[in-house]
Image (cartoon, grey):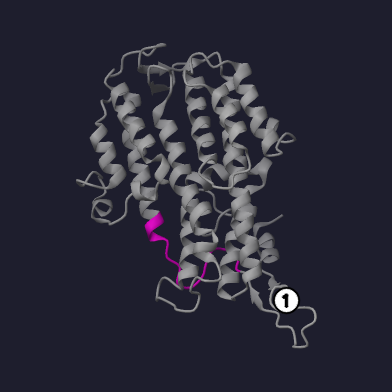
Amino acid sequence: MLPALRHSILAVAIMACCAGFTSCSDDKEDVTPTYEVPTTYTFENVNYAGQTTRLNMLNELNDYIKGGNNGGVLDAQKIKNMYANTAAPFANAALNSSDKQLKNKTIATAQAQYEGYFDAVALASQSAGAPASNGTPGLLTTADGSRKYLVDAKGVELAQLIKKGLMGAILYYQAVDHYLTEEEIGAAVDNKTVTLGEGTAMQHHWDEAFGYFGAPTDFPANTTSALYWAGYSTEVDAVLGSNKAIMNAFIQGRAAINANDAKTKEAAAATLRKEWERLAVASAIMELKEARENVADQAKKSHYLSEGKGFVLSLAYKGDHVISDAKYNEVLTKIGDNFYTTTADDIAAAIDILSTAYQLDNIKAQL
């Protein structure tokens, strides 16, 4: 179907259900809000500059840590400064002068964990390009010689564990467990007082959730500048159908807030919380499958296991996550702490636990 046609289908007027506003026995005339839903995330008074700033901070932090893959020795304090935006750690001066930071937006229960990972990756980098082996940190080289990854003494590529883990601990957590909740977009939140350039409090909170997704305003027609979760959504979209499901919900929810259509807003928020969690687990399964398929190549196995574990960690950052705590811990046990000893059967078992918990058995082979 041509993009323009797809857009015209989306741009239909929403006839919001009146049941949420008027009881069946009410003699008053039903009031049915009607409004148009745009085809892109284009509204008046949208501002998610703070989220864009944090994505840029995360870019620089990730790029610095990946310098360890080239034999660079990393400074743990510099990484922590980038995390907390102290002591002007960024090459981009605008980030240094910003009052934003990554640390205070990380779920509180995980902040110390990630600062521990920063110490660990800096320690591993002191190998300064020496080869890694079980018990010795350093660089693992892929069988074809094309890539090198800095790993710790247990074969964990901390750069990927940190990147994927912080996608969960900051971006996913802030969106699904903060901004898309009753406390931030519920009936008690102001949706009348408009701040020029930022909208009402409710509109702004919704926009901030959108900012953490990392999508351009014309996503998914445009996927070239999709970052982080929007980028991963594009990778699994052919199987999961996440691109349109998530983007349409963001657009419909924002239009509903503008029209004071609480029922449609709540439905869109529920869709986002569900679909984003499915995206996180699908991303985990995809990376774990890569690890299993490359189990004979320790460099690739460590690389993909580290990515997969980071996404699995993300699942715990949504308070009402689908997977039980017991099954979640089973997955982490199967993945293991020492990636040199994780077997193909272990990885397959981890995938099966995840796919069963999230009812993805019918598509896991295609992820």
Q: Closest to the observer: 43 or 340?
A: 340
Q: Closest to the observer: 74 or 108?
A: 108
Residue on which disc 1 sits: 18
The residues colored magenta run: 38-51
Tell me the SS state at disc 1. Answer: loop
Residue 83 appears at what percent x and percent y? 31, 43
Q: Residue at x 40, y 46 (%)?
A: 106
The stretch drawn in magenta includes residue 48: yes
- Specify the quadrant that holds the C terminus: top right
Q: Closest to the observer: 324 or 235?
A: 324
Q: Residue at x 56, y 63 (%)?
A: 40
- Is 82 placed above or below 341 here? below
Mark 1 crowd level (few <14, some 14–19, many ≥20, 10 Å Cα): some
Tell me if 211 is positioned left or right of 359 in this view: left
- Specify the quadrant that holds the N terminus: bottom right
Three-letter amino acid code of the residue under disc 1:
Cys
Q: Residue at x 40, y 45 (%)?
A: 108
Residue 240 appears at what percent x and percent y? 67, 43
Tell me if 275 is positioned left or right of 71 in this view: right
The stretch drawn in magenta includes residue 49: yes
Residue 361 sits in which quadrant? top right
